[in-house]
Amino acid sequence: MTFAHMQAATTPDTRLDRLFRPRSIAVVGASTAPGKLGSVMLDAVNRGSDGSLTIFGINPKGEGDGFHVSLRAATEANGAPIDLAVLCIPAVATPDAVREAAECEVGAAVICSGGFAEAGAVGAALQNQLADIASSSGIRLLGPNTSGFFRPASTTVSFVPTVEHIIPGSVAVVAASGGMNHALSFLLSEHGVGLGLGVGLGNCVDVTAVDVLEHVRRDPSITAVALHVESVGNGRSLLSAVRAVSAVKPIVAIVVGRSDVSAFSESHTGALATSWRTTRALLTEAGAVVVDSEQQLVDALAVLSRTRLPAAASPGVGVVTAQAGPGLMILDELLARNVRVPTLSESVQVRLSTLLPPMTFQANPVDTGRPGATFSTVLSATASDPEVSALAVYALAEPDAIDLADAVSKAGVHADMPVVLGVGGPAEAVSKTAAAAAGIGVPVVSSPTALATGIRALVHDARSRFLRAVDAGTRTATHPPLPVINLPADEATSKDLLDALAITTPRRRACPDRDTAHQALTELSLPVAVKILDAGVLHKTDIGGVHLGIRTPQELDSALDALDAIDSPAYLVETMAEPGVDLFLGVRHDEVFGPIVVAGLGGTAAEAIGDVTIRSGDLTAAGAAAMLDDLQCAPLLDGWRGGPVLNRDEFARVAIALADYLTSHADIGDIEINPLRLTPTGLIALDAVIVAAPNRQIALEGESQ
């Protein structure tokens, strides 16, 4: 037994090690006929082996050397249970083959064929059989409908013949599809990022992304993870796995589904929290660096697979560039991505002025002009600034002028902080620099944008870990148990709940008739708002159900007449709030992830503008306080043009109070405050909606019939 397998024997699930680190493989459906899937797979397994594997072909005819008529026969020949069976047979024959594998104590199976749940009812029934066999026997199943997995230079279980060209390394690709596993792996390899493991999950009848993430978390040979997500089954389990892995190894994720326009609830919360947007936001909260494209994923992993910042609230980046134009592109991209590029201290700038021509910019970015003999000293000086946590260095390859990797090495700063080197030029020159830099652990990328992407990934990874750690373990419910409200709830009842949660609301009166409304006018501070009070109306302004600025009995009568015209069953009269910035805050039970929190720019245009930020219902005080910083409208919350300043801690308290209440009341689907107005005296909830959970809503509708 090799050291790797001795180590694996002590881990929680050795069956997954038998899948990804097998010592023996049997290809079921293997053939000597060229072009058949079984023939291609058997050839790939043989060519991709490092020589330590025992490999069997399984075919009823038993034709050829190394072939056996069944898994039982191969097991007898092996003298021990086979670790992995690779099934290259039709879907209809697969359940019986898996049963045989389980009976022979095979540890795991890769099911390559399609024709299962993706193919309709008959295929779904076959897939259910596979799930039952896995559950009852304990055999681990990868797929079906997958092209397999590979460990370059060690084990290949993939029918894509060019896998052998992928360079080995330390990145794991965990992809929803076999095609994307290969596409991302090839792209990473082409950019010099080596693979330690590439997995295509397929239909996930048994082994899921959560299982593979746990496997790579405890694999010391893996330093970073590329995660490709198409759909999510158990959202909470996925987030838990991402949190666990990202605590020790960076994860870069790409999520498919930007154009998801599936059905949503009538509330703003449902409309604004599409599955794509929610998945991206919650993966980010859990610790993943979420990117928009395959190239960004490559650039981020080129950096994060080799270096990582300590957890920090706002790491500062020092930018050193040998050409001003690329430096401006890098700076622009970093600032647009909310990466801090601090002005260097006066003492550092004085030091740089003795090293650089007088016309160059030296406050950060540091423009060296054409790189010369002082380049390494410039790097050291920039890195010495206490506000600099990482260096982004860009230069065109000019071998006659400077050896960039050697300059970084002489500066010595890479031992104390991450240094990322961007090099432009011919592929041969860039490759030479990259190879030299790799020897000292410094990642190299090939463009200004790639450099900015890699640095952004470093910073966001550090921030995420900081936010999760700053108040880890302190998340508790902020309120004692509160009475369950009666559903459906009108605005007055909803605001009564907010009052109980210590969320400020306007003074108000629920009025069953006109006389009571006139009495309220004499009791409340003027002006007042007059609204339709009907639990069945979620968007009152859409039907003329809100009248503002009422001061006199005559104005009140006009407003009540208008409300009567739309059959208002009752009226809500309340004091109007002072002007401010209108926000939106909602919590809802997401079908995949459980309770989530959605916030953004509020008012009637919330859905149209879509400037929102999303967190899980388990958000911490630090996470809640920081979530509004994601918004494009965030500057409006910090005293824009003399406006009010948001107390982030107050917002966090309100968000957590709503999330706690929703979490403890499964009969509620959504709680929404829109607008939640920021005023000079704090936050005040001007409108509130509570929507029953879908199953509860159906029951209520049945009761009303």
Image (cartoon, rainbow, N blue to C red):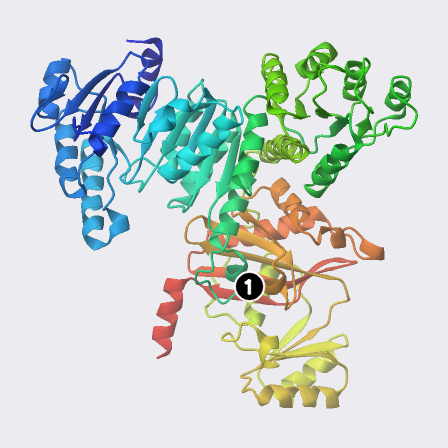
Q: Quadrant of residue 136 in the image? A: top left
Q: Residue at x 70, y 30 (%)?
A: 315
Residue 469 pos. (x, y %): 59, 31
Residue 53 pos. (x, y %): 26, 15
What residue did someone put label 1 on?
A: 268
Q: Residue at x 63, y 56 (%)?
A: 611
Residue 409 shows in this picture: yes
653 left or right, relative to 6: right
User: Is residue 87 placed above or below 438 in the rendered structure?
Assistant: below
- Of 100 and 440, the residue lying toward us: 440
Asked which secondary structure carries label 1, the reply is helix
153 left or right, relative to 465: left
Residue 97 pos. (x, y %): 14, 34
User: Is residue 75 placed above or below 583 in the rendered structure?
Assistant: above
- Of 219 and 72, the residue lying toward us: 72
Name the quadrant of the C terminus.
bottom left
